[in-house]
Image (tube, rainbow, N blue to C red):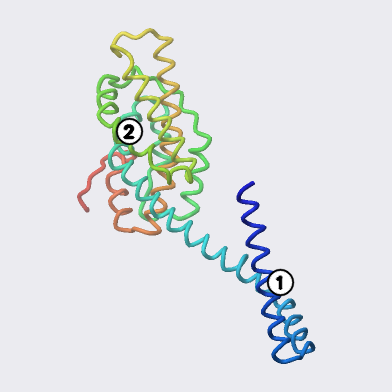
């Protein structure tokens, strides 16, 4: 209500100021015809001015702001994969019976095109892996995720992530898996029902992880070819990953 009152006051002040200036103009020059000619000309140009300022210029500024925001978000996403994501891609791959298919679909190459990434992303969004967490070392996985807990919390506190729903979903899924493993006194000798529950959490994480990794790698190929070159050499979906250039 207070904001509305302030708006009315400002509107009244500006209209009154304009009327006063026009009145002074008339008192000085005694030429109402001249006043109405320029007034009509200004009113005629007003819609075009609103279009240029409000629609065109504002959209340009918003687009530039969004690009700057995405640049910052991609830096955050890059830090996530460096600290946690790349390791999870490798550790959790062993859970899946379809690990060979995952590797075949996600084995990015230096010559991948936009169409290749689009095809891999479409597959990742429909990915149904049915993992079996008993096939990996849950103790080591828990130790790794607990070690990275503070890092994950710091990422979740970043307000810019509200603009990136996909990555936020990935963080929440990863953090939930961390809590599930951390809250159990031991992950050895768990009942089958509990193992199935953890496996479903792993599937959720990997579903988001693979898709977001593909988006991120495509961004690197477009904007940072030198980083993309390293990812091509060390990603876990190839038989012999190595940073050494052959």
Q: Secondary structure at mark 2?
A: helix
Q: Secondary structure at mark 1?
A: helix
**Which image quadrant is residue 144 in?**
top left
**Which residue lies at the image location 48% right of the left edge and 46% below the top edge?**
163
Categorize mark 1 by other alpha carbons within 10 Å: few (<14), some (14-19), many (20+): few
Q: Is residue 70 left or right of residue 51?
A: left
Closest to the observer: 167 or 216?
Answer: 167
Depicted 197 relative to depicted 30: above or below: above
**Which residue lies at the image location 29% right of the left edge and 28% below the top edge?**
145
Categorize mark 2 by other alpha carbons within 10 Å: few (<14), some (14-19), many (20+): many
Q: Which residue is mark 2?
A: 88
Q: Which residue is mark 1?
A: 47
Determine contact: label 1, label 2, CB under 8 Å. no
**Which residue lies at the image location 41% right of the left edge and 20% below the top edge?**
199
Residue 179, percent across and down?
Answer: 36, 22
Closest to the observer: 217 or 93?
Answer: 217
Q: Is residue 148 left or right of residue 157?
A: left
Q: Earlier in the sequence, mark 1 or mark 2?
A: 1
Q: Is residue 96 left or right of residue 44?
A: left
Residue 112, percent across and down?
Answer: 42, 53
Residue 79, percent across and down?
Answer: 31, 44
Q: Which mark is residue 238?
A: none
Q: Give the distance between the C-alpha atoms of the residues marked 1 and 2, in whole angstroms.
A: 55 Å
**Which residue lies at the image location 43% right of the left edge and 43% below the top edge?**
161
Q: Residue furthest left?
A: 244
């Amino acid at each position: 209500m207070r904001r509305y009152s302030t708006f009315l006051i400002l509107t009244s002040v500006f209209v009154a100021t304009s009327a006063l200036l026009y009145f002074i103009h008339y008192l000085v020059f005694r030429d109402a015809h001249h006043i109405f000619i320029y007034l009509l000309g200004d009113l005629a140009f007003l819609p075009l001015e609103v279009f240029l300022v409000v629609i065109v210029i504002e959209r340009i500024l918003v687009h530039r702001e969004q690009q700057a925001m995405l640049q910052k978000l991609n830096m955050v996403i890059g830090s996530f994969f460096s600290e946690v994501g790349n390791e999870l891609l490798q550790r959790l791959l062993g859970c899946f019976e379809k690990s060979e298919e995952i590797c075949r679909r996600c084995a990015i190459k230096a010559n991948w095109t936009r169409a290749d990434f689009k095809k891999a992303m479409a597959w990742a969004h429909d990915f149904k892996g049915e993992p079996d967490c008993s096939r990996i070392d849950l103790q080591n996985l828990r130790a790794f995720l607990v070690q990275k807990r503070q890092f994950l919390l710091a990422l979740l506190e970043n307000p810019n992530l509200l603009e990136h729903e996909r990555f936020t979903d990935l963080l929440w899924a990863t953090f939930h898996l961390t809590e599930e493993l951390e809250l159990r006194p031991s992950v050895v000798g768990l009942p089958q029902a509990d193992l199935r529950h953890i496996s479903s959490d792993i599937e959720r994480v990997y579903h988001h992880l693979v898709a977001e990794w593909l988006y991120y790698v495509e961004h690197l190929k477009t904007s940072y070819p030198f980083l993309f070159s390293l990812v091509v050499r060390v990603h876990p979906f190839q038989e012999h990953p190595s940073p050494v250039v052959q």
